[in-house]
Image (cartoon, grey):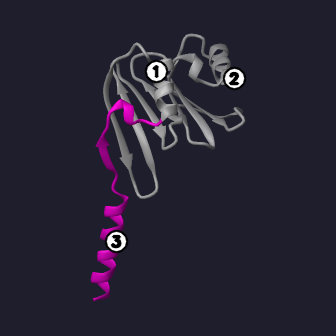
Amino acid sequence: MKRFALLFIMLLGMVMLHAEEQHITFGELPKNAKIFVLTYFKDIPFEDVYIERRASLTQYEVKLQGGIELQFDRMGLCTEIHCRRSAIPEEVLPKKIVMLVQKHYPHNYICKFENNGRMYEIELDNGILLTFSRTLRLVDIEDEE
C-alpha cells in the first residue's frame, strides 16, 4: 500500500510539472513583450506565438521567420533571444557586452542571448559561450569545439 501511495504521489508530481503549451495571438502577449517585438523585430513576420505554463512558471515564446525565437517571462520581459541565421540587434543587448564582443571577437556576432536574472549568457556564431555576472563582468568563456 505504501508503494502504491508513493507511486501515486510521484505520478501526480510529474503531471503537475509537465508544461502546458497553448497557442495564443500576438495581442495576448504582455504589453512589454509586444512593445519589445514591435520595436526591435517589427519588419519580421510571425510564425507562432504561445504561452507555456508549469506549476510556478509562465513564459511566452514568439517565433519569427528566419529562425528567430524570443522568450519572455510572465511580466513580458525578454529572457532569451535566439537568431539561428543572423545577429541579434545590438540595441537589445547590454552595451558593455556588445563592446567586449566587438573588441575580442571582431569577426563574429552574437546569435543567442539569455538573461536568467542572475547572469547573462551569450553565444557567438562560432559556438563560443560567454557568461557574464549580473554586473556585466565576464566570468566564463566556453569553447564548444
Q: Secondary structure at mark 2?
A: helix
What's the amino acid at mark 1? Leu
Per the model, the C-alpha gap separating discs 1 and 3 is 43 Å
Q: Is residue 85 visible?
A: yes
Give yes or no for residue 46 being in the magenta stretch.
no
Percent of width and height locating residue 120:
60, 35
Tell me the crowding category of disc 3: few under 14, some 14 to 19, or many 20 or more residues within 10 angstroms, Cα based: few
In the image, residue 56 above or below residue 95: below
- Kindly identify the residue that appears in the image at 60 percent across and 42 percent down: 117
Per the model, the C-alpha gap separating discs 2 and 1 is 24 Å
Percent of width and height locating residue 128:
53, 26
In the image, farthest residue toward the top: 107
Per the model, the C-alpha gap separating discs 2 and 3 is 45 Å
Q: Which residue is mark 3?
A: 10
Along the line of sight, the residue nearer the viewer: 86 or 128 = 86
- Kindly identify the residue that appears in the image at 60 percent across and 11 percent down: 106
Q: Earlier in the sequence, mark 2 or mark 1?
A: 1
Q: Which residue is mark 1?
A: 38
In this picture, residue 20 sits left or right of residue 143: left
Q: Earlier in the sequence, mark 2 or mark 3?
A: 3
Tell me the crowding category of disc 2: few under 14, some 14 to 19, or many 20 or more residues within 10 angstroms, Cα based: few
Percent of width and height locating residue 135:
72, 36
What's the amino acid at mark 2? Lys
Q: Which residue is mark 2?
A: 96
In the image, residue 71 above or below residue 7: above
Q: Secondary structure at mark 1?
A: helix
Percent of width and height locating residue 6:
34, 79
The region drawn magenta spans 1-30
- For the residues labelled 2 and 3, say whether their Cβ atoms are less than 8 Å apart: no
